[in-house]
Amino acid sequence: MPVPAHPSETDVAALLRTHLDLMRAASPPESCHVMDPVSLVDAKAQLFALRADQDLLGICALVMISPDHGEIKSMHTAAVARGRGVARALLRHVIGVARDAGVSRLSLETGSDDALAPARALYLAEGFAECPPFGSYVVDPLSVYMTRLL
């Protein structure tokens, strides 16, 4: 079961750094929308971690765009935990948290490259559909925007 986490936790900070480094390596700065730990705190993100015993398996954040529109950020599964349903469990948890908070729409931005195809397939399987850019995003061939109603 995912639990609240904070970017200051050592293992969470390390996984956020891994995520940040991977996203920055995969996209030019103008197409990279990853949030660093300070930005997550500044945005009052709700960050969740999934652990097995003491091992951190994955993280996912919820950032509010408006009172009824949330955005999924910093979704990352540790390499050793891939293929074990970690991302699905985190995503479903964040969807539940958002729904319980009265959010009516949940959106996300992810990359368009082949490496992120499994993530896009997961989002589609969980009810997300491609959509135009939302919030402050703009049309970018390196980005895929997705949303779903709750």
Image (cartoon, rainbow, N blue to C red):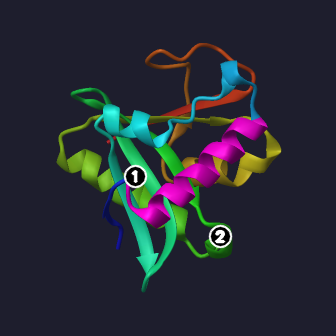
Residue located at (75% from left, 31% from top): 27
**Residue beneath disc 2:** 82
- When asked about the image quadrant of residue 150, the answer is top left
Query: Which range of residues does the magenta coloring cover?
Result: 8-26
Horizontal arrangement in the rendering, residue 33 relative to residue 12 (left or right): right
Q: Position of residue 53 (x, y in %)?
A: 42, 86
Is residue 65 located in the magenta-colored stretch of the structure? no
Horizontal arrangement in the rendering, residue 39 relative to residue 132 (left or right): left
Judging depth in this view, the residue of 57 and 84 nearest the camera is 57
- When asked about the image quadrant of residue 54, the answer is bottom left
Residue located at (45% from left, 34% from top): 107
Q: Identify whether 54 is placed above or below 146.
A: below
Q: Earlier in the sequence, mark 2 or mark 1?
A: 1
Quadrant of the image for the N terminus?
A: bottom left
**Residue beneath disc 1:** 7
**Which amino acid type is marked by label 1?**
Pro
Is residue 149 at least partly visible in the picture?
no
Judging depth in this view, the residue of 47 and 10 nearest the camera is 10
Density class for disc 1 (Cα within 10 Å; few <14, some 14-19, many ≥20) is some
Q: Nearer the viewer, mark 2 or mark 1?
A: 1
Secondary element under disc 2, as helix, strand or loop, is loop
Is residue 112 at least partly visible in the picture?
yes
Is residue 23 located in the magenta-colored stretch of the structure? yes
